[in-house]
Image (tube, helix red, strand yellow):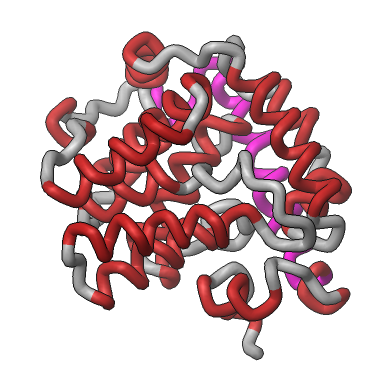
């Protein structure tokens, strides 16, 4: 298996999301880079020299798309997610779409929106030694089959979901996976928040309030780490001070 397989749908399906020693080692460098970038970026926000402070992003670039796929995904998310996790899913799309607009990326917004709504839907599952994203990807498969999505588009959406909490997702993984991971990173730990206008960050939270998200998400990830002790969530908690990073995210609640 190549290092680039780590976190993909095929990898999670085959391994249950269990990291080998070599795979954990391969994630240390990108995790360290993310921490360094976050520290520098957050400092730039404190001194008001961050790159996003005067950036303009057209609101239309962040509007949710409407299609059979997105409506089906939204229905599943509204049925299965708590209010705090549902709003996190909406914010994940908004921040991911905003970063995509800033980078002028060509992304399938329907797939990005559907993936954002479904990416955490597996968190409430209770399957030991199986990464929660596999359950999320299975719901995404069911939604895709319901609406007749092509196999290629289904694979794109599902792999974006299983990849999203790996610390090494890049544009080489495809724009949907890249922006899903980036949007979630903004909302959970503030990663790349300094690249977005402060009024945009505020407006997204006003539209989709956090509702105690930090507390609920930290508790859910503690449960996930206990269920999958060799998974990526436990890796992030052990080597990435993930719970502290959540507390220090530049949002209240």
Identified at 38% across, 57% down, the residue is: 140
Q: Taken as a whole, is the magenta stretch helix, strand or loop?
A: helix
Quadrant location of the N terminus in the rendered image: bottom right
Quick one: 217 or 26, which is closer to the camera? 217
Identified at 47% across, 60% down, the residue is: 137
- Is 4 drawn above or below residue 156 in the view shown? below
Q: Give the percent coordinates (x, y) of residue 243.
A: 78, 32
Asked whether the viewer can see residue 194, the reply is no
Quadrant location of the C terminus in the rendered image: top right
Identified at 87% across, 48% down, the residue is: 238
Asked whether the viewer can see residue 213, the reply is yes
Quadrant housing residue 139 = bottom left
For the record, the magenta segment spans: 25-53
Quadrant housing residue 24 = bottom right
- Is 17 drawn above or below residue 253 in the view shown? below
Q: Give the percent coordinates (x, y) of residue 226.
A: 85, 47
Q: Is residue 43 magenta?
A: yes
Left or right placement of residue 147 versus residue 244 in this view: left
Identified at 83% across, 70% down, the residue is: 25
């Amino acid at each position: 298996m190549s290092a680039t397989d780590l976190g993909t749908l095929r990898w999670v399906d085959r391994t249950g999301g269990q990291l080998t020693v070599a795979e954990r080692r391969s994630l240390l460098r990108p995790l360290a880079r993310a921490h360094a970038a976050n520290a520098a970026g957050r400092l730039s926000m404190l001194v008001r020299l961050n790159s996003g402070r005067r950036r303009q992003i057209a609101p239309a670039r962040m509007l949710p798309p409407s299609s059979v796929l997105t409506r089906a995904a939204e229905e599943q998310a509204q049925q299965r997610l708590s209010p705090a996790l549902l709003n996190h899913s909406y914010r994940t799309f908004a921040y991911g779409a905003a970063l995509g607009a800033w980078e002028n990326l060509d992304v399938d917004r329907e797939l990005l929106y559907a993936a954002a709504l479904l990416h955490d839907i597996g968190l409430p599952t209770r399957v030991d030694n199986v990464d929660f994203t596999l359950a999320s990807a299975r719901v995404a498969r069911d939604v895709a089959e319901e609406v007749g999505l092509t196999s290629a588009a289904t694979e794109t959406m599902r792999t974006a979901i299983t990849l999203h909490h790996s610390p090494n997702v890049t544009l080489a993984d495809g724009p949907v996976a890249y922006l899903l991971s980036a949007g979630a990173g903004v909302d959970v730990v503030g990663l790349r928040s300094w690249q977005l206008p402060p009024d945009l960050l505020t407006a997204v939270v006003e539209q989709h309030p956090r509702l105690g998200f930090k507390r609920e998400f930290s508790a859910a990830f503690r449960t996930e780490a206990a269920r999958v002790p060799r998974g990526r969530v436990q890796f992030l908690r052990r080597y990435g001070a993930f719970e502290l990073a959540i507390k220090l995210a530049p949002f209240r609640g």
